[in-house]
Amino acid sequence: MPSTHTVASGADPGVGATIKRAVIVGTAPGRAQRERVDIELDELEELARTLGAAVLERSLVTLREPHPATFLRSGAVDALAARIAELGFPAVLCNDALTPRQQRNLQEAWKVAVLDRTEVILAIFARRATTAEGRVQVEMAQLEHLLPRLAGGWSHLERQRGGVGLRGGPGETQIEVDRRLIRQRVKRLRTRLAVIERQRQTRRTARTDVPLASCALVGYTNAGKSTLLNHLTNSEVLADNLLFATLDPTSRRLDLPSGRRIIVTDTVGFIQNLPTELVEAFAATLEEVRQAHMLAIVVDASHPDCEAQLATVLETLADMGCDQPALLVLNKADRLSAREQRARRLTLGDVSGMSPLCISALRESGLRELRQAFDSMAARVVPETRANRQRRDAASGDSVPERAAG
């Protein structure tokens, strides 16, 4: 995987860059959209904090139509250049997607590293991936993103290639060699990922052979899915108040009130404008969501933009072809008054077409009702086996000895 490095002024940051200080820049076509963009900048600021960067300032620029060369108009570029110099040349994080040409021109104009929203998310994923599968997926996404942004910085991959038939002719430029090397590297990563996916499929088949219902916890990043898994199953999965604190899926067994058991899986969170490279690279991981018998859609009910976050999750699930039975779980309800909870239930219920259940995973309120809801859903999606029925009867004290065979 590309190594993480510290950004110097004027350097090409790459997606594995270490950013210590940053300025955030966003654009809105008019006053009516400024409130919406402000919420997106709040999220980008949280992404920067997850990346380990201190945000010195944020700027919202009115822009009706992007400039093809610099995205921003020349007046805004010059004004921001002066302000960036006053702040000591921090990196710039742009809320908008930039073309390779726009990114290069802004870096030349501002003499600092410039990352768009996609690169910030990729950098976070590069830091957070811990499993072999996660690292392969992130590296693939990085290379796919960097391919059109090459500036001769990937020639170190040349040592990974063989000899015969791979060396470019005299007319082949360095950047063409680098592009070919990256494509070869991506091809090898896809092959490796296919092997990992077969191993995951074997494990998934082993779980399927055991007739337990499976439930995937899905939702917007930082909605509290990992905290919910921990408190439901007495686990110790990493749960932090950061975006994308968890990337790799984690499965735990959950015992329900009836004695029935299910498998609950914590999955990577969704986000608005999730980079296409990441959706494609994490297809194997997201397969856990597709294969689940049922879904628990977890929403941070206290977030001011929870309606848009829920809409993003529902749209992503629809794009993935997920149509399993689902339960809408409004988390962090302890941060809301009773009146606000009622309003959120009505609003988010209308958005999703589901009847929401309010809980607080951190305070463990509403978890009993959630377990009962899981119990009812599991009874519908997976037929009860004799072993499960015996365990349930034993838990309720109604066990009846099975008649001996023959």
Image (cartoon, rainbow, N blue to C red):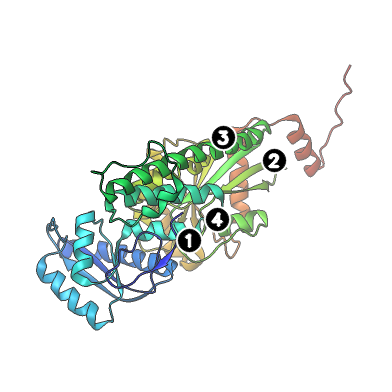
x, y percent for residue 277: 37, 47
- Whether tag 1 and tag 2 are in contact, CB under 8 A, the answer is no
Q: Secondary structure at mark 3?
A: helix
Q: Residue at x 46, y 67 (%)?
A: 337
How many other residues sit within 10 Å of disc 3, few (<14), some (14-19) or many (≥20)? few
Mark sitting on residue 127: 1
Q: Residue at x 33, y 57 (%)?
A: 153
Query: What residue is shown with label 2?
Result: 260
Q: Amino acid at mark 2?
A: Arg
Query: What residue is shown with label 4?
Result: 130
x, y percent for residue 308: 34, 54
Dividing the picture into quarters, in which one does residue 13 lie?
Answer: bottom left
x, y percent for residue 178: 33, 49
Q: Amino acid at mark 3?
A: Arg
Distance CA(mark 1)–CA(mark 2): 38 Å
Distance CA(mark 4)–CA(mark 2): 32 Å
Distance CA(mark 1)–CA(mark 4): 8 Å
Q: Secondary structure at mark 1?
A: helix
x, y percent for residue 230: 62, 58
Q: Earlier in the sequence, mark 4 or mark 2?
A: 4
Distance CA(mark 4)–CA(mark 3): 19 Å
Q: Earlier in the sequence, mark 4 or mark 3?
A: 4
> Which is nearer the eye, 187 or 257?
187
